[in-house]
Image (cartoon, rainbow, N blue to C red):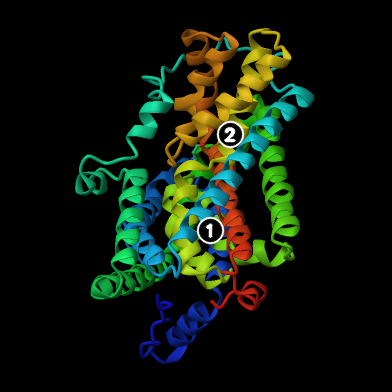
Amino acid sequence: MTDPVTPSTPARPKGPAGRLLALWFGTALWKRILLGLVLGVAAGLVLQERSADIKWLGDAFVRLIRMLVVPLVFVTIVAGVAAMAEPRRLGAIGLKTIGLYFGLMLIASALGLAIGTVLQPGLGVDLSAAVPVVTGAPPPPFAETLMNIIPLNPIAAMGSGDVLAVIFFALLLGIGILVVGAPADPLRRVFDAGSAVMLQITYFVMEMAPFGVFALIAWVTGTSGPAAFVSVFKLALCVVIGCAVQTLLVHGGLIRLLARLPVRPFFRDVTDAIVVAFTTSSSSATLPVAMRVAQRNLGISPTVASTTLPIGVTLSMDGTAMYVALLAMFAAQVFGVDLSMADYLMVILTTTLVAIGTAPVPSASLFILAAVLSVIGINAEQTALIVGFILPFDRPLDMMRTVPNCTSDLSVAVVVARSENELDVASYLARPVE
Ligand code: ASP
């Protein structure tokens, strides 16, 4: 698959406007995105509630990147698999990827429990002012989720944005092209070109990121300012610590120990994806950016990037697992439920399983909470109270947990690529190109 080319610079106006444009486009994108973030906080503090008026700019950005998810996943997986020299390698890549994702989520759930046990965020919390919020039907049983991976109709799966089913069909199509060989070459070239074009569109859309990030951060800062945090301060602190440990130590450790690479270039290379995950609170919306940084900055081959990342976005949710396990501790402390060792293990296992089924969209954690809390005997009414208590503050907490959701995918992609000899180390170590 060809690497997307940076478009040739169009003629720019001369004079101060031209210089400003040259300065803007001459600055690395991740720096411009960080600038948007900082200015967004300032604008939110100044505008307060009125920051809601500019939220449309952030919404437009999120829509643009979400628009890319289904076509990008579809064409890049087909092209990635069809580019494989050995069909059997798909099995090795798949097993490593899923094993690592699963292991990381078990660690994340255990981390959430450990932080909740040590810091006790639920102690002394009074829920009497909370308005119960019912989060609807519990998620379907795990067996049903598995069965739904096989689409009845692949076109309908694309239409409804059912990413797991799209991945399944795309993998099969890629394998089909690979096995048919030379007669399927025209089709392989179509998908190759398609995936270069989709990555190029991602490049265009990312030029809007500094503005989208600015508006989203201004809105969050302006509407749920620091004052709102006093009552959930301890819980928020636990979430910050949990996300930081999972991202920096666990994912960083994975890079250091399993991929045997320095950690600093990893975090520098994935800054764009981290900021987009943080501001949009949606790992699904972050996927196109993650695909781009994986190939352009981390030096991961299209084959590994296009198989590990889309699977990771839908299955691997470290931040969510850490958060839900932490909330289980929180709820147990609020309602005075004593937990045995068996309860802890059940929470870790259930959290990991339901995190796999969590949608990669904002606030999705709260919809799966009931499934985990029921394991430790917390009933539906009590769960509704917990959700009602957290919901007003969920957005900033969601922003934080979406970061490890995204870095888990990227760190696993690096480890798998490295072990499969599909990582260009020079590109990994070099500074991002734009
Ligand atoms: N917002 C998270 C994500 O998109 C899911 C969640 O924990 O609510 O990854």
In this rendering, position of residue 382 left or right of residue 247: left
Q: Is residue 123 visible?
A: no
**Which image quadrant: the N terminus?**
bottom left
**Residue 406 in the image, given as x and y percentages of width and height:** 55, 50
| Disc 2 from disc 1: Cα separation | 20 Å
**Camera-side mark, 2 or 1:** 2
For the residue marked with disc 2, what is the amino acid? Ala
| Tag of residue 196 | none
Tell which circle, 2 or 1, labels the residue nearer the N-terminal end. 1
Residue position for label 1: 273
Label 1's element? helix
In this rendering, position of residue 240 left or right of residue 350: right
**Which image quadrant: the C terminus?**
bottom right
Foreground residue, 180 or 379?
A: 180
Residue position for label 2: 321
Q: Is residue 423 visible?
A: yes
Q: Residue furthest right?
A: 118
